[in-house]
Structure formats: C-alpha cells, structure tokens
C-alpha cells in the first residue's frame, strides 16, 4: 500500500552551501560543457537549414548556456560580485564559442538555400 504521507510530504530544504557550490559548478565552461555547446549549436544550425523549429528548440534544451545565467541571477540576488563576474565571463566565452562553431558549420555546410 502507498504511504500517502510520504507521497505528499515536501522534502527539507537543501543546505545553502550545497546550493551555492552546485550553482557555482554550473557556471564553469570546460570539458563536457564545451562539447555539449558545440553539438547543440550544430543541431540548431541544422534546424535552421531545414526550417525545423523542433530542432532549434531541442538545441536550446540541451545547450549549457543556462548555467552562467543562473549564476549571474544568483549572484545578483545574493550580492556576490565574484559570482556575477564569473557568470558574465563564462557566458560571454560560451557565446563566442557558439558563434564560432555555428560560423564553421555554415562555412562547410552543403546547404546554401535560404529558409523562412
């Protein structure tokens, strides 16, 4: 039988330090985040080439660009200037890598017709 109290009970809040570390870890742009961003930009470019909004939305869902944005927002809400600077720097770095990877895709892409 299902325990109704466990089903509707809300879990305790997380420790503040754990939350801070988790958000700070999501800001950094290295390793798997780099490859995930390049792959998501490739999917978005393919979606633009074949006029597929589903592919573009799917690329947005897997893109790691949200980590620095959450870090910036958390830094602004807590007044942590270091977190804000770190988030802005990593976000700008991710945007540059995304633009470069999409430029390379369209440079070597065999599709050259415009889509709506």
Image (spheres, rainbow, N blue to C red):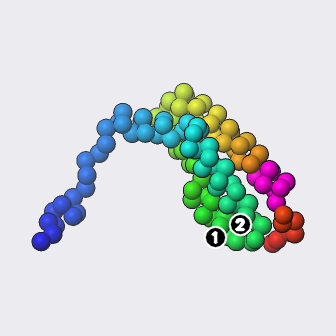
Q: Quadrant of the C terminus?
A: bottom right
Residue 77 visible within the image: no
Left or right of residue 37, residue 80 in this image: left
Q: Quadrant of residue 51?
A: bottom right
Task: In the displayed orientation, state which residue is furthest to the top.
Answer: 82
Q: Position of residue 18 (x, y in %)?
A: 36, 36
Nearest to the observer: residue 19 or residue 29: 29
Task: Look at the image and give the residue range highlighted in magenta.
Answer: 102-109
Residue plotted at (46% across, 40% down): 23
Secondary structure predominantly adopted by residues drawn in magenta: helix
Q: Secondary structure at mark 1?
A: helix
Q: Which residue is mark 1?
A: 54
Residue plotted at (69% across, 60% down): 44
Q: Earlier in the sequence, mark 2 or mark 1?
A: 2
Considering only vertical position in the picture, is 104 above or below 58? above
Residue 109 visible within the image: yes
Are dots 2 and 1 in contact, CB under 8 Å?
yes
Q: Position of residue 3 (x, y in %)?
A: 14, 66
Q: Which residue is mark 2?
A: 47
Q: Quadrant of the N terminus?
A: bottom left
Marks 2/1: CA–CA distance: 7 Å
Q: Quadrant of residue 115?
A: bottom right
Q: Secondary structure at mark 2?
A: helix
Left or right of residue 44, residue 103 in this image: right
Residue plotted at (15% across, 69% down): 2
Nearest to the observer: residue 38 or residue 10: 38
Check disc 2: other Cα within 10 Å, few if <14, some if 14-19, many if 20+: some
Left or right of residue 110, residue 84 in this image: left
Q: Position of residue 46 (x, y in %)?
A: 73, 64
Can residue 78 be found in the magenta stretch? no
Check disc 1: other Cα within 10 Å, few if <14, some if 14-19, many if 20+: few
């Amino acid at each position: 039988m299902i325990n109704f109290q466990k089903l509707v009970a809300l879990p305790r809040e997380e420790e503040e330090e754990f939350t801070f570390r988790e958000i700070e870890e999501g800001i950094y742009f290295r390793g798997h985040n780099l490859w995930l961003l390049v792959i998501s930009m490739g999917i978005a470019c393919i979606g633009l080439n074949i006029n597929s909004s589903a592919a573009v939305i799917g690329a947005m869902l897997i893109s790691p660009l949200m980590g620095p944005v959450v870090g910036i927002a958390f830094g602004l809400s807590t007044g942590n200037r270091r977190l804000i600077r770190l988030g802005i720097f990593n976000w700008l770095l991710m945007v540059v890598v995304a633009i470069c990877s999409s430029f390379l895709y369209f440079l070597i892409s065999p599709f050259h017709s415009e889509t709506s």
